[in-house]
Image (cartoon, rainbow, N blue to C red):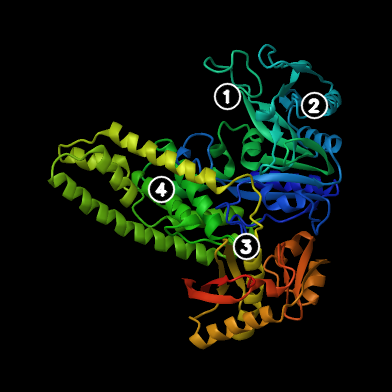
Amino acid sequence: MTLSEIRQKYLDFFKSKDHVIIPSASIVPENDPTVLFTTAGMQPLVPFLVGTPHPSGKRLTDAQVCLRTDDIDEVGDNRHLTMFEMLGNWSLGDYFKEESIGYSFEFLTSDKGLALDPKRIYVTVFEGDADAPRDEESIALWQKAFASAGITAEVGVSEKDEPTKTEKGARIYAYPKKKNWWGPAGLTGPCGPDTEIFYDTGLPHTEGFDVVCNPNCDCGRFVEIWNNVFMQYNKTAEGTFEPLAQKNVDTGMGLERITTIKQGSSTVFDIEVFQSIFDAINALAEKTPQEAERSYRIIADHIRAATFVIGDQNGVAPSNVGQGYIVRRLLRRAIREGKRIGINEMFTAKIADEVIRLFGDHYTQLTNNRERIIEEMNKEEEKFGRTIENGMKELEKMMAKGEVSGEQAFLLYQSFGFPIELTEELLQENGKQVDKEAFAAEFKKHQDLSRTASAGAFKGGLADHSEETTRLHTATHLLHKALKVVLGDHVEQKGSNITAERLRFDFSHPQKMTDEEKQRVEDMVNDAIRRDLPVTSGTYTTDEARDMGALGYFADKYAQLGGNVTVYTVGDYSKEICGGPHVAHTGELGSFKLVKEEAVSAGVRRIKATVTGPQK
């Protein structure tokens, strides 16, 4: 069963359980300045988990593209990925533990799903504490599920009870909050116990880990494959836990990881999508995957991730700031590894084409934005080639002055992208050597700083719905409409990003805007603000939304899946498909200022703008 087949099987299974399939949200969050990328399946759904009605109903399922940056330097081993797909099913005040656990067990073990051996499945639950009791309900439901497969699942104690491999014995383990509790995302809010599902890989327990192997032992025998979060409590400002009026279910299963298990592979890089990317790399390289396993993994992972970010509906080009810096870092690390394995030509766009071929059917934005992906990768590769040349000159200067220190070698790595191995080779050719220990110390210092920065970028998933970002989000709607009126109907949104200080809006237009056009757009937006128009919302089918003239950047995606959409109406000014949040009246924006208009790529322009907020 291929990765694509497992993704579709999952979505079809939950569709048969009356869930609506919703599209993957943007990997680049549109209105959340607290996070660089979407890092978890639950992140785009947080507003609906805390009470906002979802236009598609109470039962949802999706495959969400996620990207995590804190382990970029670890990619190359047998398990780390920068980008991954998270399969999820959601209940927003509908079903709870009984159905959730039943669905999970059925999908994993029955022919309707993956038909895995139930004797290789183990689960963990919340053990209880002063805040909330032990999750006896989940224990009983798991015992019932296992019993349906002829298995007597007993509750084990992790310090002493070896997990059984037979039909009877320890199969359920209870752990504290650190292991089996989710949330709240902030200091207060929805939270609750979770139950995690593990698969026994059959690998032997090795010394140096827990004395008695258990699902949470790090020896590698057990792999977590699915997490079911039961949001049933609200943590108050006083620190107490009260029952939630609306109980939700939020589940997540890593697609690449479950595909690895289903295919019987030993690492995620053995599954067919990565092997296809390896083949594309191998056609260009002097070294084979067997000779340079780590380099192949880095190139495949990083170019796949960069392809999704550049090709996203809110696509980001390589740059030196924010998300663009991550894209640049991914591509340059891949290019360095390409040089190491003997790729002596421009290659990132060729590998990106293979990624588009593999994923473009499901993630149509990749196919639609192929031209942009190829253009940005070629530009970055050419630019990095010039940087490498400059690095060579810098190294020659250093060598002319004597020995090259570890700190200098790291400067070459950080500023010019020079791999330490390349520095080492060039020094050896000239009878010199580098202090690798000093280089490693500088490298670790850099890693620690990167991790600290990444940790600060995502604090639990709640989008920033501050007054500033809400005003700027409404301003993007006014701007979108004004651009269509002033420049023409060919204008389409190509991406947006909002921080507390400014909005950034990318749109299709073949040439630079004139000063007169910019002034007309600014005047039109400010006129809509001065009129203090009401902003209202309603839920419609995609056909109804189109018939009423709503602009819809994501409309085609929702239409393919048959989902409903929320349409925000700004007086008699505009209608647009959107998830919110918005101000109640346009007068709350104060005034609008178009700060900058520039090119992003061929046929795509970018506007940066601000609003003042209401006058005090």
- Image marks 4 and 2: residues in contact by CB distance under 8 Å: no
Residue at the far bottom: name it.
516
Residue 231 vs 339, above or below: the answer is above
Task: Name which residue type carries label 3.
Answer: Thr
**Residue 288 in view here:** no
Residue bearing the label numbered 1: 218
Task: Name which residue type carries label 4.
Answer: Arg
How many residues crowd around disc 2 within 10 Å: few (fewer than 14), some, or many (20 or more)? few
Residue at the far top: name it.
160
Percent of width and height locating residue 28: 58, 57
Mark 4 or mark 2, which is nearer to you?
2
Q: CA distance from mark 2 to mark 1?
A: 27 Å
- Image marks 3 and 2: residues in contact by CB distance under 8 Å: no
Mark 1 or mark 4, which is nearer to you?
1
In the picture, measured across the screen, residue 90 lies left or right of residue 516, that is: right
Residue 289 vs 43, above or below: the answer is above
Residue bearing the label numbered 3: 469
Residue bearing the label numbered 4: 333
- Image marks 1 and 3: residues in contact by CB distance under 8 Å: no
| Residue 587 falls in image quadrant | bottom right
First of labels 1, 3 by sequence position: 1
